[in-house]
Structures are given as C-alpha cells and as structure tokens.
Image (cartoon, rainbow, N blue to C red):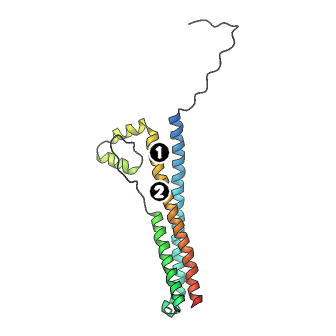
Amino acid sequence: MGTRDPDAPPAPAPAPASAPPAAARAHLCERLLADLRTEIARADSKAAVLVAALGITAGVFSGLLAGRNWSPDALSAPGATVWWAGTLSLALSLFALLLAVLPRYRSGTWVLGQPLSYFGDIQRAVKAGRLETALADTEADPVTGLTAALTETSRIAWRKHQWIRTGLIAFCTGTLLLPASLLIG
C-alpha cells in the first residue's frame, strides 16, 4: 500500500452503484405486471356490473310486457324486425360479457429450461418432477419469466377489454331497439 500525498487533490468519489440493467428491467416488468393484473380485475368487475345491468334490463322488459299479456307477434313487420334485432343485441351482449370474464390461459407448454411465468407452468413442472430445477432456472433469469408473463397478461387484458367493448355496444343497442320496436308498433 502506498501513502497518499497530502497535497494531492482528493480522489473523485466513486460513482453511485446503479441497479444492474437486468434488475432494473425486472423491477419494471414487475410493476407493469402488477398494473396489468389490476386492470384485469377492473375489467372483470366492469363485465360483472354490465351482466347485472343486462339482467335488470331484461327483467324490466319481461315484467312490463308479461303483465300486459303481450307478445312480439303483436308488432308490425318493421316493429318485429327491430324487436328481434334488439333481442339479438342483448343476447350478443350477454355472450360477449361472459367471454370477458372467462378465465384465460397461456397457449403453449412449459418445457425444462424455460422460466416459470404463470400457474400452468408451475403445474407442468410439478407433474414433470422438475419444480426445483424450474425455480432455479427462473431465479437465474427472472427477466425472461417476467417478460413472458407480461406478454401473456397484456394479451389477456386486451382481449377482456375487446369483449367488454363489444358487450357494452350490444347492450346499448339492445336497450334502444327494444323500446323503439314498441313505438314502431
């Protein structure tokens, strides 16, 4: 070890240790994944509320018309066409909203050497008797597993929102067409 010259300028302070790129990327993926999971939960809640509103709407229309001993046969041809278009719109709405809340799974299968990125991967690793190895692989390269989970989770959120949009448009269409058919007569 050498001695330091007291008259020499002080040595520059070492640069602050920054997170390695992989750790920063993993943190970003984890944050985005948490945001996507929250968005999926919101989408499921929206779809559930819309299904409830659809049930109330159908119940109100049914109750009003059943009390009057009415049937769509009483409508003119244009009125009946609008009635059945409204009924089909409400059926489409129900179908789309149920598809929005339908559980979705990642396509593909986990194989040894790939990181675990969702519950199906874990189940496949357990069935293969390779969970410990799969956990070690995932721990060694967390970013790969996180990006796979991020990719799949964003696909799920996108699809849910598409079905909710379809269901909402069909719901609004149906709730406008049914009363319109009664006005047309």
Task: Identify which amino acid the numbered label 2 is placed on.
Answer: Ile
Task: Identify which amino acid the numbered label 1 is placed on.
Answer: Thr
Which residue sits furthest front? 78
Location of the C terminus (image quadrant) = bottom right
Rendered view: 168 above or below 122: below
Total tally of numbered discs in the picture: 2
Residue 97's disc number: none
Find residue 107 and report its image quarter.
bottom left
Residue 178 place in picture, x, y as percent? 55, 83
For disc 2, the neighbor class at 10 Å (few under 14, some 14 to 19, many from 20) is many
Residue 137 place in picture, x, y as percent? 38, 38
Residue at 61% x, 27% y: name it.
16
For disc 1, the neighbor class at 10 Å (few under 14, some 14 to 19, many from 20) is some
Give the CA distance from mark 2 to mark 1.
Answer: 14 Å
In the structure shown, which secondary structural element does the residue marked by tag 2 occupy?
A: helix
In the structure shown, which secondary structural element does the residue marked by tag 1 occupy?
A: helix
Residue 90 place in picture, x, y as percent? 50, 76
Question: As rendered, which of 78 and 179 lies closer to the eye?
Answer: 78
Q: Which residue is disc 2 drawn over?
A: 156
Q: Earlier in the sequence, mark 2 or mark 1?
A: 1
Find residue 141 and report its image quarter.
top left
61 on left or right of 144: right
140 on left or right of 112: right
Rendered view: 112 above or below 79: above
119 on left or right of 43: left
Residue 50 place in picture, x, y as percent? 54, 69
Location of the N terminus (image quadrant) = top right
Q: Which residue is disc 1 drawn over?
A: 147
Rendered view: 117 above or below 73: above
